[in-house]
Image (cartoon, helix red, strand yellow):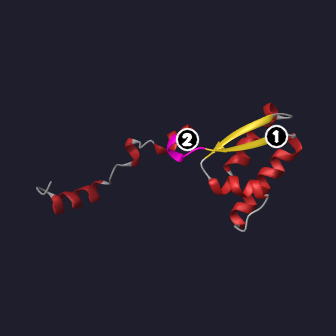
Amino acid sequence: MALANVLSSVKGSIRDSRVDVFVDSQALISACERQGSRSPALFRALKQVFVVSSPLNVDLRLFYIPSADNIADLPSRRILRQDVMLSSPLWDSLQSVFDGLI
């Protein structure tokens, strides 16, 4: 689904072009090569990619990249301070249980 959304958002600049896409999903690459999948979710995603890319006349080429090397995933890997904060009651509860043990 993300691939279809990205293609849709840049459709004005990719029309009649070759588009190289680096993905960390070997299942997606395999499904594209086979032009289908038994997985309903993957099949829907492929269908969306086709619906978006077909009128654009793009030569879509998928390349595998391991998740750890995928720079597009960096923002989602970053841990923000507000993501790891505990509520005051929970912090107090943990302090009372583990105080002095660490």
- Residue 29 placement (x, y as % from top left): 69, 52
SS for dot 1: strand
Instruction: Please give the name of the residue rendered at 28% of the width and 54% of the height, measured from the top-left corner.
Output: 88
Label 1 packing within 10 angstroms: few (<14), some (14-19), many (20+) = some
Residue bearing mark 2: 70
Instruction: Please give the name of the residue rendered at 72% of the width and 38% of the height, measured from the top-left corner.
Output: 20
**Above or below, 21 relative to 30:** above
Magenta stretch contains residue 66: yes
Quarter of the image holding residue 37? bottom right
- 81 or 89, which is in the foreground? 81
- Residue 66 placement (x, y as % from top left): 55, 46
Q: Which residues are magenta?
A: 65-69
Direction from residue 89 to residue 35 in the image, left or right: right
SS for dot 2: loop
Among numbered discs 1 and 2, the one appearing first in the sequence: 1
Look at label 1 and name its amino acid.
Asp
Direction from residue 67 to residue 5 in the image, left or right: right
**Above or below, 15 relative to 45:** above
Residue bearing mark 1: 59
Label 2 packing within 10 angstroms: few (<14), some (14-19), many (20+) = few
Magenta stretch contains residue 36: no
Direction from residue 9 to residue 83 in the image, left or right: left
Instruction: Please give the name of the residue rendered at 55% of the width and 37% of the height, measured from the top-left corner.
Output: 71
Q: Quadrant of the C terminus?
A: bottom left
- Residue 21 placement (x, y as % from top left): 69, 41
Quarter of the image holding residue 27? bottom right
Identity of the residue furthest to the top in this view: 13
In the rendered structure, find residue 9 and report the number of the disc placed on it: none
Look at label 2 and name its amino acid.
Asn
